[in-house]
Image (spheres, rainbow, N blue to C red):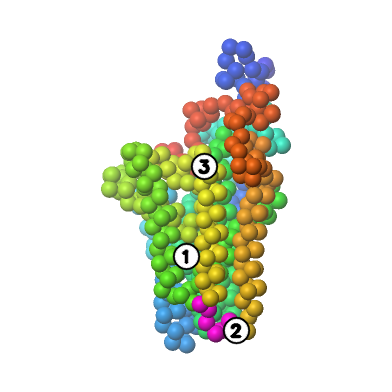
Amino acid sequence: MENNKPKEHDITEVVVQQSAASPSENGFVKVISHSKVHPPFSVLWATVLYCAEFICASVLSSTYHKSEDVVWMGLTITFILVPSVLTQLTLTFVHRDLGRDRPLVLFVHLLQMGPIIRCIEALVVYCQAGKKEEPYVTISRKIKLKHGKGLGPAFESEIGHSERKLAVHRNAFKRTAVIQAFLGSTPQLTLQLYATIQEKYVLPTRLALMIISMISIIYGALVCSVLAIQIKYDDYKVRMKPTAYLCMILWRGLEIATRITTLVLFSTALTFWVVLVGLINLFIFFFQPWVEFWARKASLPENIEKNFSKLGTTVVLCMVTFLYACINISCWSAVQLDLADHDLVEKQPRWRSLAIYYTLRFMENVTLIVLWYFFKSDFYEYICTPLLVVQLIVCYSLAVIFMLIFHQFCHPCRKLFYYNVEDCLRCACCGKKKQAQPPEDHAHGPQEHAPPDLTNQLIDRETNIVGDIMEAA
């Protein structure tokens, strides 16, 4: 093989033939020079959502203040500030600004404008990327998917400083998007919808805030779903198609809208009982990971953060579990917690958990809707309430159908499934367990689809890059 030097910023692929002695070492495509730096669209979109919701909620709070609606104003401000403060803390923690001399950045965070300055930093890094040659920080090794199958060799790409910094920003804003969606936008949307029904009129500002909150929740749910796919198929280069995103938006939008509408309607008829329903859901999902952790008699993960004691690690785990519970109250979290793992996420999520969640959630929604129908107030006498009940049930059923369609036809790694949705439905309908035999493709050539062990070869992953960037800096 010739040793040709690649030109600056060019990508040269050198196919190394597999040797009989060590195929695991040479069976990959080596990509020399840096991988392409992509624009930080996710950072920009999360910042726009944060600013839009913050401004709209502030204007609505001013309207409540003028009309002397103290309760609505207090709750609206609370649902602005709580996720905003958590967002500032998350960004400061991920970028480790407390240990660095950056007083201006910390001051901007105190003004609750942290996402804006972080977005500007990401845009500056992107604009300066590629203007001069950079030494690579680490090497990423992935397997390309061909028609949804992990065929072909792995390939390597060098990760430069600019791409690594952008990865840190993207990871930070993924966390803030989920926090904003389920600790801020979800209670905000529930509150404003409840206030609209109680006051029997719609304010334009309130309607705008509800729309922005709904978009924020759907985006947070999409982040959870994509993150779950990336964690499970970490060895593969996963790319989502537009049809997959469309199916996920329909699935998540119908699921979240139906769930929040059901809770709000139930609260208008049985106000105090909805608090009990919410607390039961919260306690179940909060303690479920801890019960599994104690049942396995596992120990707390080490090195979540170098400076954390066992008490600090426990506090962080409690906060993560609380966020996990809040997500599952409104929709399926897509990821399952494993408190004994360093990444805190179970690498092999179970289909059974997905089926149990949607079955119980469907039964709960139907029960709440029926109870609302029998105990509703006179306000709904001019509305065809039976039709509304049927619409809510049908919408949640459509959400489940779109979820099944996504996993059967639109999932980027559906060809790698040991069993797909069709197999699971056939087993459920027939009441028989299929024998554990691999699909036909795996039976004929299992070694072609089995991915190489890239865990030890991969220097770092995107979700655990904070430590290396600080050492490189």
Amino acid beneath label 2: Glu
In the image: residue 246, left or right of residue 289: right
The vertical placement of 320 against 161, above or below, is below
Q: Position of residue 420 (x, y in %)?
A: 64, 40
Stretch of the chain drawn in magenta: 375-380
Q: Main secondary structure of the magenta part?
A: helix
* Residue beneath disc 1: 184
* Residue beneath disc 3: 349
Does the magenta run of residues contain 377? yes
Amino acid beneath label 3: Pro
State the residue at coordinates (38%, 40%).
Answer: 340
Residue nearer the viewer, 30 or 213: 213
Camera-nearest label, 1 or 3: 3
Q: Are marks 2 and 1 in contact (CB under 8 Å)?
A: no
User: Could you classify mark 3 by the number of other residues whose Cα lies within 10 Å: few (under 14), some (14-19), or many (20 or more)?
Assistant: some
Name the quadrant containing residue 217. Answer: bottom right
The vertical placement of 25 against 136, above or below, is above
In the image: residue 329, left or right of residue 142: left
Secondary structure type for disc 1: helix
* Residue beneath disc 2: 381
User: Could you classify mark 2 by the number of other residues whose Cα lies within 10 Å: few (under 14), some (14-19), or many (20 or more)?
Assistant: few
User: Could you classify mark 1 by the number of other residues whose Cα lies within 10 Å: few (under 14), some (14-19), or many (20 or more)?
Assistant: many
